[in-house]
Amino acid sequence: MVFRKRSLIRTCQAAVAAVVLATGAVAATGAAAQAATQEACDLYAAGGTPCVTAHSTTRALFGAYNGPLYQIQRASDQKYLDVGLLAAGGVADSAPQVAFCAGTRCTVTKIYDQTANHNDLPISWGGFWKGPGPNGSDIGADAMALPVTVGGHPVFGIKVTQGVGYRIDNARNVPVGAQPEGIYMITSSNYVNQWCCFDYGSGEVSHNDTGNATMNAIYWGTACWFNGCTGTGPWVEADLENGMYHTGSGSNKDPDNPGVHHPFVSAWLKNNGTSNFTLKYGDATTGGLTTPYSGGLPRGYSPMKLEPSILLGTGGDNSVSGVGEFFEGAVTSGFPTDATENAVQASVTAAGYGSGGATNTGAVHAAGANKCLDVNGVSTNPGTSVQIWDCNGGTNQTWTRSGSGELTVYDGTRCLDASGRGTTPGTKVIIWNCNGQNNQQWTFNANGTVTGVQSGLCLDVTGAGTANGTLTQLATCTAANNQKWSLS
């Protein structure tokens, strides 16, 4: 990746980035070689606020890093694979993952920390709020659920569905107490909700609510805890425990902040521990940063009381109802300058995030019936019902999962569709002309279920039937075998 200015990046920010790059400073990473290109955490280090965690499934956040990005496990034989980079300081090498996961489901079991602190994020063991995993633990994300591109190369992000969560306790060298801290992450407006909490940042070691000011994490979503929010979101907010704060008073009355809508969003939070927290956002593909709030901490939140736990995808007490997408992020020691954050934003936009990543084509297998998702009568007519049938490799059983979450058939000319944009149990599942609406977008979850993005309901074999011709529908999710599917 080559650092370059984009025409829409403010001239002053590009100049700051160039000055920072000229210092040549490189933070310590898992690799000893001098970085040829400075990436996000090199820039933070050059600004005097080094990364103490650096997590990404898409690319290196240090120019010299050449270690693994994340670990996956496949369901068929429980084997593991570390996903690395195409080259030091480069983007993820996704080809081994695609081959490894062919014909089965894969789960992201760990996100490696690229700093020398090795604050890797495993699946969270749970907390006050129980996850859907064994003994109340959370679950890992579907490794194939979020294909995108970086610099034109296919990579995968982390799609946090409800119940997915990662966490490390007793993390090394992270800010604690009232020590200042900076955080950024790259996320998306494509997949959000209002529930608690899609977070990235500092939480409690006990995975319980230990009081105000014991968290400092970016919250991303449409939560409006203090009323008076402008617009419908999503927004970048600060989860400081017992509240997601738009401002020091909590509410958002800024007419210029009705919500942020980009396929790739850069979200920022910094907190000096005693008197200021600052929120920023930007388009992660172009341009600079906007600051919707920089000011005093809420009453009762000074000084901060941070604990050495770093989380992704859940709240401090393991609240597991939030959803979101994560591509990269870091936590810093110290309160980063605006100049440093501008330089990091410029490096992110230069990376070249893009939609339409790797696709997966094959049969969609119904686990309970041991049959395939099938378009009735090999018809291409919009409105044709979708059923299960003996697997035969026909064109009416060959589905492609696109980067936007569609399931297409007949070479992408028809999409799996919730009939009439229905959102109630019993809605028929059909094929229809692809139109980009969210009743044609589907999420493959780590437990094998497939949910409609619009409805949140599960793709279901009606009546748990196993006979050829049994129709499919939307139904309340139960995780029963008639709601479990795999694409291969």
Image (cartoon, grey):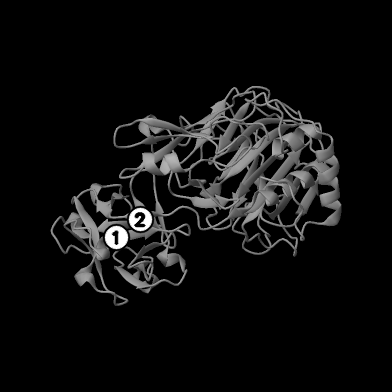
Q: Compared with residue 473, is residue 478 higher up or lower down, i.e. above or below?
A: above
Determine the image quadrant of residue 343.
Answer: top right
Asked whether 319 or 188 is in front, the reply is 188
N-terminal label among 1 and 2: 2
- For disc 2, the marked residue is 361
Mark 1 to mark 2 CA distance (whole Å):
7 Å
Q: Position of residue 207 (x, y in %)?
A: 54, 30
Left or right: where 129 falls relative to 470: right
Determine the image quadrant of residue 241.
Answer: top right
Kindly state the secondary structure of the residue where label 2 is placed: strand
Q: Dot 2 surroundings within 10 Å: few (below 14), some, or many (20 or more)? A: some
* Tag 1 and tag 2, C-beta contact below 8 Å: yes
Q: Amino acid at mark 2?
A: Thr
- Image quarter of the N terminus: top right
Left or right: where 184 falls relative to 76: right
Q: Residue at x 23, y 56 (%)?
A: 372
- For disc 1, the marked residue is 398
Q: Amino acid at mark 1?
A: Thr
Q: Position of residue 22 (x, y in %)?
A: 84, 38
**Which disc is residue 70 wearing?**
none
Q: Position of residue 364 (x, y in %)?
A: 29, 54
